[in-house]
Amino acid sequence: MNEINFTTFQDEKFVLHRVKFAILLTLQIPAILLSLLIFFYFFTHRTILHIRQNQALFLLLIINFIQLTFDLPMVIHFNRLGYVSPTKSSYCAWWTFLEYTLNAASEMLMATISIQRHILIFHANLFNNRLNRYVLHHLPLLICIIYPIILYLVIIVFDFSCDGTQWDYSSNICGLANCYLVYDKVLGSFDWVVDNGLPVVVIILANIGLIIRVLRQKRRGQGIISWKKQRKLTLQLLSISSIYFLGWFPNIFIGIIQQLFIPGFISNIQFDYIFDLLYLIYLLMPWICLGLFPEFIKWIRKFFVKEYQRGNTIRPTNHFN
């Protein structure tokens, strides 16, 4: 009976991995192509990058593209096989380093963008000063990139306190079985709460605060910038922030419970379903950005219309003797 149940369980896992493999691969390809189109548009229309809010979004898109092209392929490869390959401790260490670093950088960038959006809407003149631009804009964005890299290099790549037997090669991302998450509750809790939970809280509070401030200013009928521009900047932030909340909140909630109270709390559901919500951030980000830039949509239409017309122009004609 136990053998039958185990076989049924393995069959269910196989089907689940195959379904995930098909879904992720189907969504990954158009997301990469669209990201490349967005980058090409930015490089051919460089004046867009002179707009301050677009600079942070462009950096966020670069992180997202790295996730799509380096991190997600390993997840797809796992789901294709149903197990981690190669089954090496070093592979798991570098995979989790890449996963955690990119996720944390993406979260922190989004939190920073959420705060900076308040300045852009209500105190844009602060950025007229060069020192303020570096302190309030450039430096926070730089910290969002450098801090996760250094942190996870130290606590994952250069941590030799474990012998590598803690990895789970039958689970995605090697079961998230890093030494500090398995054996160090203080550091593991700190990582979940500060490096993952805090940015999400900042994103939520900054968005709620922004909505309240914009509506109050509209009601008073006074504002430094037009209501139309306020609404555009607010909707940009809300549309991107919503996928971060949907992807991260369930994972952070479960992760904190596992670190502080119940180590195995719904771990099967977490690895089979909940953790995959994070990949929706990578996959949906380019499509959300598509709606944020109406000029980009117009450019795409013109680009493909020109290519179609050019194809018709150079199409060879038949000659009859």
Image (cartoon, helix red, strand yellow):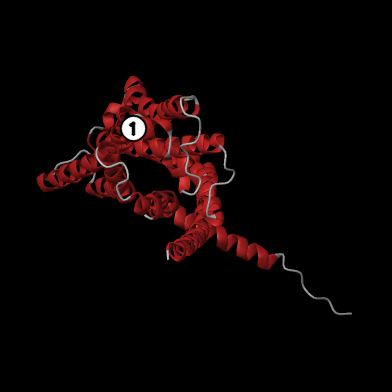
Question: Residue 233: horizontal and vertical position, in percent?
Answer: 29, 45
The residue lying furthest to the top in this view is: 131
Question: Residue 182: horizontal and vertical position, in percent?
Answer: 38, 35
Question: Residue 115: horizontal and vertical position, in percent?
Answer: 27, 35
In the image, residue 51 sits, relative to residue 292, either above or below, namely: above
> SS of the residue at dot 1?
helix
Q: What residue is at 49 percent from the left and 36 percent from the top? A: 165
- Determine if residue 293 is in view: no
- Determine if residue 84 is in view: yes
The residue lying furthest to the right in this view is: 321
Tell how many labels.
1
Q: In the visual, does 119 lie left or right of 151?
A: left
Mark 1: few/some/many CA within 10 Å (<14, 14-19, 20+): many
Residue hosting label 1? 188
| The N terminus, quarter of image | bottom left
Q: What residue is at 54 percent from the left and 43 percent from the top? A: 70
Q: In the visual, does 78 lie left or right of 310?
A: left
